[in-house]
Amino acid sequence: MQSYICQNPIIEKYYKILCDEFPEFLYDYIQTDAMQRIGKIGCNCGTEYTHIFNHKFFYSNLDHSIGVALIIWNFTHDKKQTLAGLFHDISTPVFKHCIDAMYGDYLTQEVTENLTEKMITDSNEIMNLLKRDNIQIEEVRDYHIYPIADNDTPKLSADRLEYTLAEGMYFRQDSDIIWTLEDVEEIYKCVEIQKNEEGIEELGFNNIKVAEKFINGASKLWKCWVSNEDKLVMQFVADIVKEMSYKNFLTQKDLYTLSENEVIKKIENCKDERISNCFKQFRQTEKIGESDFPVEDKYCIGFKTKQRYIIPLVKENNTYTRINQLSPIANQTINEFLTYETPKYAYLDFKF
């Protein structure tokens, strides 16, 4: 793989698992300014910038988008679907879903997707490449039209599979990651295109034991994504950005043109010391507080957020069945997540 695509050897090996031969046509698209921009935005909604979380390495939205494209190409060898997958996060602002939270979109986290087509059409580089490849904007602007690329929860799609596999490699639970490259390879080798209950193509597993392993590891991430730690970080970053914008220290354009590091420098060097000092405390925080009641004189939040989980198909006796109908172990794990509750409120040990 060419070094300008990715310089992290773990991610390079991971890409090789997803697709043995990197499709050459993707390189030009990846190198466009519009795609390179999201290489400076993390996939983890601000959790990279506080000691509350301890990720093994930085994983960008460009890394994720390439991974999605490789999964789609591996299973379909369709350029249009693959490019739709590559572009699906092109409109991501800094801190990703924190900006959805800033707009109050806690449950769908899709507000920031509305600019996808504009980001593509505003890029002369991308539009020239699409013209070169005889591809219409309507064929790549919305990856939702391709069920292998994206579908509704709890089905398995390239997007959902990619961020689950990738985060399992860099997310630390205590001191351990959820799975190694070898685990990812074992899981991925058992994925194939299947037909779901509606007769629509969907990614699924051809081995129930491997599917159980996937559910066991993924469920740890599901709980993390609805944890008070995750919600608190996302909301605090959202409120910081909102305050910076309200006081004209940040513009709407900055969210889509600056890197996260550039925005962080603006926050840290903000003339309003209340903002800069609180952000400094946030970055140094290692543990949050939780409560069933609002906590006064602290930065305290409480809300429900989007549940991300998967109930994949599994092939058995030439039929495709949801794993919760085949495996009591997986069914219990899924139900434990669906009934999982955290204390109602979370707080940081300072007021903002």
Image (cartoon, rainbow, N blue to C red):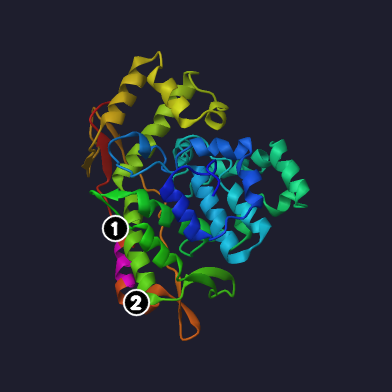
Q: CA distance from mark 2 to mark 1?
A: 20 Å
- Magenta residues, as a range? 330-336
Q: Which of label 2 and label 1 is nearer to you? A: 2
For the residue labelled by badge 1, is the local secondary structure a helix, a strand or a loop?
A: loop
Up/down of 265 relative to 177, above or below: above
Residue at image coords 73%, 47%:
130
Seen in the image, is 80 located left or right of residue 279?
A: right
Up/down of 82 relative to 203, above or below: above
* Mark 2 neighbour class, 10 Å CA radius: few under 14, some 14 to 19, many 20 or more: some
Residue 139 seen in this snapshot: yes
User: Mark 1 or mark 2, which is nearer the start of the sequence?
Assistant: 2
For the residue labelled by badge 2, is the local secondary structure a helix, a strand or a loop?
A: loop
Residue at image coords 77%, 47%:
132
Quarter occupied by residue 265: top left
Identify the amino acid type marked 1: Tyr
Predominant secondary structure, magenta span: helix
Relative image position of residue 113 (x, y in whole percent):
57, 44
Seen in the image, is 257 located left or right of residue 185?
A: right
Identify the amino acid type marked 2: Ser
The residue wearing badge 1 is 340
Seen in the image, is 154 located left or right of residue 22?
A: left
Residue 352 seen in this snapshot: no
The residue wearing badge 2 is 327
Residue at image coords 53%, 30%:
255
Give the camera-side residue of 87 and 144.
87
